[in-house]
Structure formats: C-alpha cells, structure tokens
Image (cartoon, rainbow, N blue to C red):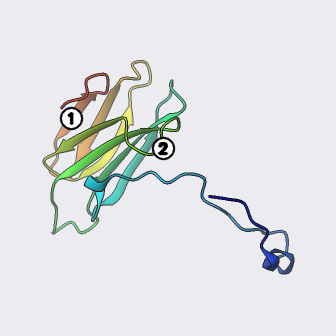
Amino acid sequence: FKFWEDPSDEFRDGEGTLLPLWRFSDHRARRKQVTALCWNPTYHDLFAVGYGSYEFLKQGMGLINVFTLKNTQYPEYTFSTDSGVMCLDFHPQHPALLAVGCYDGTVRVFDVRRKEN
C-alpha cells in the first residue's frame, strides 16, 4: 500500500486516514471468523490467530495460523482442529508451546517447532 495525501484530512479535527500496512490471509481460513489472537511473549514478531465460528449452532473445523511480521504473505505454521478455536495463548517460559481451547471443550497444546499436528 502506498501513502497518499487525502484532501479531506483538512476537514477532520486532528484525525487523519489510516492505511493498512500488511494483510495476513490464508485460503484455508476463508469463511471462518477470527476468534482468538495472541502475540508470542519472546519472539515479538510472531503471533497466532485462531479461527472458528461465532454461530455456535453451526460449528465446523477450526484452524490456527502462526504468522510472522517477517513474512506477511503466508503463515509460518498451520494447525487444524476438529472444532472451532475459542482461545489460544503461548506459554510464557516456553515460547514454542501454544495452548488452544476449542468449542467442544478440548484443550490442545501445539509445539510450533514441529510443523505438523
């Protein structure tokens, strides 16, 4: 995205226009909502996104993508779950461990150093 001068900025009291810096997407996450997001406490450029559904009567498979700011085109790691993701967080002392809570009540721990489930 490029910067541009917005002539309407002069009519906004102290407000300007926000431009997106990056777009993080994955074709497997289409038609899914982002239900959780967390930053890694050690690797500050790494964050995890959990996907599921806000329609609790229509739950399907869940997805977890781990992105880095160094590569905004594709996720570094991808994991799938049998149920939608409700929450997730990295371990504070072991930054490669990602705990995930799913809609069906299961709790899973992923090691992001291993690229498979």
Q: Which tag, 1 or 2, sits closer to the chain's start?
A: 2
Q: In this orientation, which residue lies closer to the viewer: 45 or 3?
A: 3
Circle 1: residue type: Arg
Is the C terminus in the top left, top right, bottom left or bottom right quadrant? top left
> What residue is pinned by disc 1?
108
Q: Position of residue 42 (x, y in %)?
A: 51, 24
Q: Position of residue 40 (x, y in %)?
A: 47, 31
Residue 20 horizontal side relative to residue 4, left or right:
left
Q: In this orientation, which residue lies closer to the viewer: 75 or 83?
A: 75
Q: Residue sitting at 68 percent across and 63 percent down?
A: 18
Q: Residue sitting at 27 percent across and 65 percent down?
A: 31
Which mark is in front, 1 or 2? 2
Q: Relative to 113, say whether 100 is above or below.
A: below
Instruction: Give the CA separation, mark 1 to mark 2.
Output: 26 Å
> What residue is pinned by disc 2?
72
Residue 13 horizontal side relative to residue 94, left or right:
right
Q: Residue sitting at 13 percent across and 47 percent down?
A: 82
SS assignment at label 1: strand
